[in-house]
Image (spheres, rainbow, N blue to C red):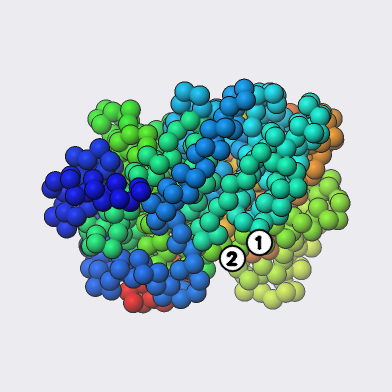
Amino acid sequence: MMQSLIDRAAREAGPAPHPRLAPLYSSASRLAPALNRLRMVLPQDLHERLTERMRRLDGAHWSARFWRGDASLWSGGDEAGWLGWTDPARLAAVAHRSLGLCARLRSRGRTDAVLLGMGGASLGAQVLASVLAPAQGGLRLHVLDSTNPEQVRSLQARVPVAHCLYLVASKSGGTLESTLLAQHFEDHVARVEGRQRVGQRFCAITDPGTPLHARAEAGGYAAVFLGDPRIGGRYSVLSPFGMVPLALMGHDPIAFLREAGTMRDFCGPRAHGHANVGLRLGALLGEAALMGRDKITFWADEELAPLAEWLEQLLAESTGKQGRGLVPVCGEPPGPPCRYGSDRLFVVLQGPGSPARGDERTRLGRELARAGHPVVHVRIATPYALAQEFYRWQYATAVAGHVLGVNPFDQPDVEASKQRTRGLLARGAEPADRPAGQRWGSLLLDVGASEAGAGGAGADDVRASEPAVGDVGATDGGATDGGAGDVGTRDAAARDAGARGAADSPAGPEQALARWLRRGPGGYHALLFYLPRTAGTQAWLSRWQQKLRDAGGGAVTAAFGPRYLHSCGQLHKGGPACGAYLFVRMAARADGTDGASEPLAACHAAQAEADLRELRARGRACVSVRFGASLEQGLQDLSRLLEGALAQAAGLGGPDGPDRPDRPGSTARAAPASLPREARGRAEAGALA
């Protein structure tokens, strides 16, 4: 039905915006609103490469092959089986079947819905909750994607059980965090209302036949909404994982998907060359990465900040593999051109209420473009037109994967940290109980056995995997060519240094962190907080993203664990080996609030430790900091420590080291970080097939 309405609207619409798109949507049609505006301002070298890339893609009939499901566009594997997201008309039919059930769930005195899920099962819903207020009779939507006990308790206190519906969302149905959160809130409802009332407070969104599907049926959940196994998690926002929450908010998923249908036709088999807006964007992202501009920096209106985080997951998890990938940067405050190196591409996201001119981000975007940085401006015309961007960027990500020579639909390295987490939990030991490193104020600093400087990791660091948490690194610079014996000597020296009293010297941690701050060409720093996500912790991260960037011009990403494991965790492990990671967490302490949160606390601690170990095993430069006092005191002390480290780094030649080619103001081009030299030729050849 929806497709027939779309076809009729296209016939009645009159002239289309572009002659190649005459049979498609017209901005004059009520059913086919205007396309969101996307404007690219590119330096000459990137513009020329994009033009050539588009010529080759068009000559290879890329779009037609995509719509035929030609897996040879990527690895030639199972990619054709992951394209279920490409047909909004079919997704609208699925959404239509759930409308009546969603309407019934909105009744019965409910005012709030709490979605429990991770990654693609939650990030899209978070965008919808940020951009769209509940319609009349709709539920307020809250999204919980953390096992941090304090964050869980905070939401639990804000939303009374008596007026709440809980949605457990998981594509696989076996996501560890989602399972623990479901159990926690089932127990919470049982304590408040009795075990017999639990089922009617819950519904599930999952694929058919999953453990969550079985749990929902056995537990008498009020509803089960089934996803499409042909859609991966990060591509699922236009499926029930996004449309059920939208309907529960009282909005019309059919109208929303109609907007996605508009973008689908501008990316469809009849949209060729530059008229294919998704193809052009994806080609730009891929080509920019091949030039070394792989740090995709998002500046977003406040209500669109969750859209930037959704894009972070989409780009990082889809492209961050085989030593290459796009590195999204979210939450970093905008700055003048002199603060950025040559590894950036900027995306300015503006909503319907954003002024066309006079906005600070728009003004800075123009300055960046004049300084030779590539800038992409996206203006979303209406709240429902958000669906256009969901579709455009999903299509563009598939194109970027082709250009980079990777499969954009798998996540081969995500499982590694999960396996380590399961191992830690199975042993039943609290991983944070062991002594750790050097003390500095209320902090406990662990630089690990291979403190090698960002991007300088090599084979030796990989062999020195899974260091004891108490090991204190004392090495400087990058990896060496020594054998396994050298690694053992180096680790022993590190332990001896700690035993000689480095832990008691306030300069020791500053020097260690100063070495960590030095990044290699094209590198970046990641601040990973296993702390409650609050306005205060978010402000701290944003402030230090800016300070570290301004000190050296390098990109600084920031994220909260464990949610980042489901977004940029794949990139950290499988992407360019040029990141340096700072883990920040609370020291182990008994949870004195309620026993139900103990499994959450254990999982939270195990996930932090597991990811730290996995990254070190892969030779990544990692530092772990634990707060031994309150959260506020810990943040203050960490700020002081970082200030001291920056001063030390200046004495070592700056956070980036001397003679960086992509320091602010430099005209030299950094080597592409997102593609190893030996792999670049393969990707170039494969992408042009």
Q: Which residue bears the numbered disc 1?
A: 415
| Residue 98 percent location from the top left of the image | 52, 42
Q: Name above or below for residue 625 compared with residue 498.
A: above
Label 2 sits on what residue type? Pro
Image position of 435 (left or right of 8): right
The answer to whether any part of residue 70 appears in the image is yes
- The residue that appears at 61% across and 63% down in the rendered structure is 413
Q: Which mark is residue 688?
A: none
Image position of 491 (left or right of 92): right
| Residue 21 percent location from the top left of the image | 19, 55
Q: Distance of mark 2 from mark 1, alpha carbons?
A: 7 Å
- The residue that appears at 72% across and 60% down in the rendered structure is 419
Foreground residue, 492 or 677?
A: 677
How packed is label 2: few (under 14 Cα within 10 Å), some, or many (20 or more)?
some
Q: Residue 412 carries which label?
A: 2
Q: In which quarter of the image is the C terminus?
A: bottom left
Place residue 303 in its image quadrant: top left
Is label 1 in a helix, a strand or a loop? helix
Is label 2 in a helix, a strand or a loop? loop
- The residue that appears at 64% across and 64% down in the rendered structure is 618
Image position of 288 (left or right of 249): left
